Image (tube, rainbow, N blue to C red):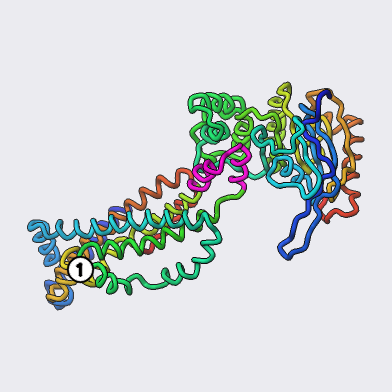
Amino acid sequence: MVNAARIVLFVVVVVLWQVASNLNLFDPGVVPSPFAIWQHLVKWTLDGTLWFHSWITIQETVAGFLIGAIGGIVFGFAIGRYPALAEVLDPFILAIYSVPKVALAPLFLVWFGIGIFMKIVLAAVTVLFIVFFNTLAGVRNVDRDLVDAVWLMGAKPRDILLKVLVPSAMSWALTGVRIAIPYALIGAIIGELIASNRGIGYLISSAASAYDTAGVFAALIVLTILAMLLNAIVDEIDRRLSKWKVDASVSIRGT
Amino acid sequence: MTGPPAIALRDVGKVFVRDDGGAVAVLQHVSFEIAAGSLVCLVGRSGSGKSTILNMIAGLIDPSSGTIAFADGSTKRPRLDVGYMTQKETLLPWRDVLRNVAMPLEVRGVEPARREARALELIRVVGLAGAEKRYPRELSGGMARRASLARMLASDPALLLLDEPFGALDAQLRGDLQNELLQLWQGSGKTVVFVTHDIDEALLLADRVIALQSGGRIAVDVELPPARPRAVRDVRFAPEFIALHERLLDALTTDPDAGARVAS
């Protein structure tokens, strides 16, 4: 029922938009008609443009995400295990974290060049901090009573680390990972917008600089689909986590 | 009782340092012995230091003064042979019931097949058959307590330390679990130290009740009639138990230094 209403709403909006375009209510250079956008999408799909650029963006997003997530978890555990070290590093980490990652893009461009690597680094840095802070919070918030209970069973420090601290902090870390997934895409796209010759971000900026608004819209639609796919992955992770973690079902969206 | 006591506290004191730097003497000059194989209840109001005594026996905290000795005469922590259960649920939320119950055996390096068999047996004994694959958050309060009981017993420890284990349950469920604990304990030869603020619970379960006033001062130390099982009815209405109840209640309510809260 809800789905039917959604489809109707979508169709009505698109049809009205097309009618308005046909009546020349919009300047096609500002707001292209749905049909023009559709034509772009079909053309890009057929000539391989779509796949080529999407694949680049996906590679950047996934690589940046993996590097950032693994790095964030490793650093989070490493620093969380040593509270004194965490306290010393705290202001520095916070300072670096406070810098908008977009502002780092020009620097990364100088350091790593125009290629795919620069986008991966940008995505990774964005993801890393989110995962790092969540992991650190997880390590710091391990329930002391659980540690005591397992210690009283005769557990060795290694058991307590692997069987209590890691799984306990892991739920926090995974929450960070979950939140960070869309940010990986944002990092990659920003990198592409700043400077690139491939990827969906490039597709958007090159179409825009040619005043090809239909192309911009088409590229945005591809980007939207990609983002929706990522959200579906997030939901799947949610579902698996919530098996034992009560508050994992609380959706943290808005990204 | 023959043989050395399972636990002997000698002149034990405990001082906690407050956040503002002040020191609070929670326990002073506490001495008593617990016979092997007996079920001893420590009753007291909050602040009497009964949980502190239990945690020191467990080895979670060290006494500030005095010694706690065990059956072999050592003052070393017995943690490899102790089962510990508090009011707070400490099942690991990321493990299902089976793997929670098997946990004490796992950290001891018991091979998977054997620890699983043992865990399954205990899960059946505590009446949780069929819930092996459930996670703690999928359990009711009573079921979680049963799982904790099973886990505590998994390594077959000679000493069980319980700190108000059934305090959060409704009266009906508490009664069920008290009975189950007694059945598991009787004939097992295990020594049980059971902390509670509930005099009825102490009278129902214990071989011996020690009532603590603030600072760990022992106000009453009494052996109960050995006849078992005791019915709740007996404990409530039999004259000898009424007299005991009054003695214990007196000890807890006449405590000159106790806080404002009155335990039942």
Q: Is residue A146 left or right of residue A206?
A: right
B82 or B179: which is nearer to us? B82
Q: In which quarter of the image is the C terminus of chain B?
A: top right
Q: Where is residue B18 in the image (x, y as percent from the top left)?
A: 74, 60
Q: Which residue lies furthest to the front in this view?
A: B74
A184 w.r.t. B48: above or below: below
* Quadrant housing residue A2: bottom left
Residue shown at the point (60%, 43%) measured from the top left: B90
**What is the three-letter code of the residue carrying label 1?**
Ile
Residue shown at the point (38%, 56%) measured from the top left: A71
* Quadrant housing residue A104: bottom left
B1 or B141: which is nearer to us? B1
The part of the chain drawn in magenta is A145-167
Q: Where is residue A56 in the image (x, y as percent from the top left)?
A: 19, 59
Residue shown at the point (60%, 28%) measured from the top left: B127
Magenta stretch holds residue A149? yes
Q: Is residue A25 in view?
A: no
Q: Is residue A100 left or right of residue A140?
A: left
Magenta stretch holds residue A100? no
Residue that carries the numbered disc 1 in the rendered image: A114
Q: Residue furthest top?
A: B187
For the residue labelled by badge 1, is the local secondary structure a helix, a strand or a loop? loop
Q: Where is residue A246 in the image (x, y as percent from the top left)?
A: 50, 48
Q: Is residue A27 in view?
A: yes
A85 or A164: which is nearer to us? A85
